[in-house]
Image: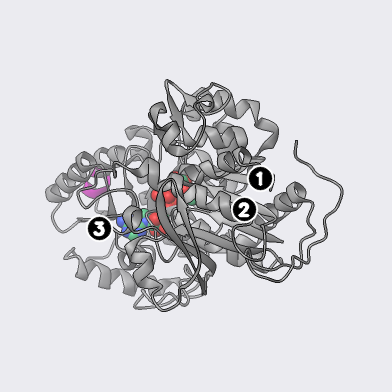
Amino acid sequence: MKVLAVTSEFFPFAKTGGLADVTGALPKALSNLGVSTTTLIPGYTTVLERLAGLLVPVAEMTLLSEPVMLRRARTGAGEILVLDAPSLFHRAGGPYNDVNGQDFGDNWKRFAVLSLAGAEIARGALPGGRPDVVHVHDWQAALTPVYMRHRGCSVPTVLTIHNLAFQGQFDASLLPFLDLPASHYRTELMEYYGGISYLKGSLVHADAITTVSPTYAREILTARFGMGMEGVLRTRRNDLFGIVNGVDEEVWDPTTDPYLPYNYGATNPRQKEKNKKILLQRLGLDTDPGPLFGVVSRLTWQKGMDLLATAADDFLSKGGKLVICGRGDRAIEQQLEALAHAHPGRMSVYVGYEEHLAHLIHGSADAIIQPSRFEPCGLTQLYALRYGSVPIVSRTGGLSETVIDANVAALSARVATGFQFHPVTVDALRHALSRALHAYHDGNHWARLRGQAMKARFSWDRSAREYASLYGRLSGVTIGQSTEVGSTEPSAGRRSVRRMVR
Ligand code: ADP
Ligand code: GLC
């Protein structure tokens, strides 16, 4: 089975959040099942730099009047196709914004070209033929199924929604520049509140829609979480599936993590104390004993970081220490910085994106706080569990189904792995922090909770099986034998007569 994945992020080459973790890890887990994934990603400057020497040119095209070159590389993370389009992707800044954090004005074009390249590959633009399934991620790749259908390509498609808050909304006057007919501006296709939405186009066109936890799959059918897309999602509810994310155990493993001064596992979690001391010293915080809670997150409204900026005062005043690594809304960053200023030696805020610090916080903190207002899946709490940093989370989306609250029943059944709170308010978060603080001071209780957290398994194996089974149902291809997209060997998969898609 050959799958073409299209995505704007891919760990370890381009990452702003969990999307990259998922698209980087899933192909590895799928390959164990006989599914071979080729991932198409934009040729950002950093990607080209990191893959220099490995890239081989495979095809030249002109897409939406932009000359592009597809370059192939084989990496430890699987087969990659890099879309080298200098005018679109060779620039300073992140994947989506410039160095000042402003969205690039031509994002509509950058990601339409990415999507169109995906559609052309699906149509057989590369030697070796077409994939059996095309799997696109989020709005940046969402036009691929739209282009495929418009250009007569019937390869089955899967759209994964990682976050419905990002919908790729643009002015309808762009349609001709997208090489799509003006008639796509209709309620049943891409029209969305007077503009067009790439994500909506994909919600309409994709054969199957997945999102990253069963709970979020249910939530997005409601007005509260649907972000205006609940209507179209309800019309597709029979094709909508929730598949929870997993942990890339090669990247996130406290027993081998190269970023940790001291590695440890479930048998020797006390080693964390040594990491903690090093982290506290490095950040210039007091090294007296006591709980250190951490945050590794985008600092945004979604993540409830404004609530934390208010609720944490109580925890800090009671002897807790807090370390934060994140970036996001400037106002929230400032709120957190002000709190740190008010608690010298007790709280540190690193504003920025720092892989090393993220790992070190997981490998040092006693607890990790994730008070999200909504959370499609969340990976931070999964890493926290594995690293024995007890997660304190709001009861929403993937957080609600991956963390088991330390209530009386769960404690006596010895299955509790963290703390949940609801509703997502300052008071409820303050209460959850105080429950965690209380539990921390009961040493045995805390050790048991941490041990149970470390035993929770969210590996990719199970979720990859669910994706593989979905691909199989859509394509009718038997899983087990495969080649890569665009390779010259024929797909060994056998087509069965049963097609599960409309
Ligand atoms: P989201 O994708 O919504 O941001 P997830 O929990 O799914 O949330 O994934 C976040 C990913 O980004 C994790 O791998 C986390 O470690 C990483 N991350 C978030 N903020 C930072 C940061 N400031 N520095 C380093 N890694 C970060
Ligand atoms: C999104 C979501 C997050 C999810 C990640 C990967 O960014 O906000 O909950 O874990 O995608 O699927």
Instruction: Say whether residue 447 is left or right of residue 481.
Output: left
**Which residues are the magenta region?**
313-317
Q: Look at mark 1 in the image and give the residue it sits on.
A: 153
Q: Look at mark 2 in the image and give the residue it sits on.
A: 122
Main SS, magenta residues: helix
Counting residues from the start of the chain, the first of labels 1 and 2 encountered is: 2
| Residue 294 seen from this side | no
Work out whether residue 286 or residue 440 is closer to the camera in this orientation and state it.
286
Question: Label 2 near label 1: C-beta < 8 Å?
Answer: yes
Instruction: Say whether residue 21 is left or right of residue 333.
Output: right
Instruction: Look at the image and tell me in which quarter the C terminus lies.
Output: top right
Q: Is the residue 421 above or below the residue 474 in the image?
A: above
Assess disc 2: are there few (<14), some (14-19) or many (≥20) residues with their C-alpha within 10 Å of its C-alpha.
many
Assess disc 3: are there few (<14), some (14-19) or many (≥20) residues with their C-alpha within 10 Å of its C-alpha.
few
Kindly report the distance in space between the C-alpha atoms of the residues bearing marks 3 and 2. 30 Å
**Residue at figure coordinates x 33%, y 49% from the top left:** 96
Counting residues from the start of the chain, the first of labels 3 and 1 encountered is: 3
Name the secondary structure under disc 2. Answer: helix
- Measured as percent of width and height from the top left, residue 431 is found at 37, 39
Question: Label 2 near label 3: C-beta < 8 Å?
Answer: no
- Measured as percent of width and height from the top left, residue 174 is found at 40, 32
Which image quadrant for residue 69? bottom left
Kindly report the distance in space between the C-alpha atoms of the residues bearing marks 3 and 1. 35 Å
Q: Look at mark 3 in the image and give the residue it sits on.
A: 92
- Measured as percent of width and height from the top left, residue 75 is found at 51, 74
Which image quadrant for residue 332? top left
Q: Is the residue 196 above or below the residue 346 in the image?
A: above
- The amino acid type found where label 3 is placed reads Ala
| Cβ of mark 1 under 8 A from ligand 2 | no
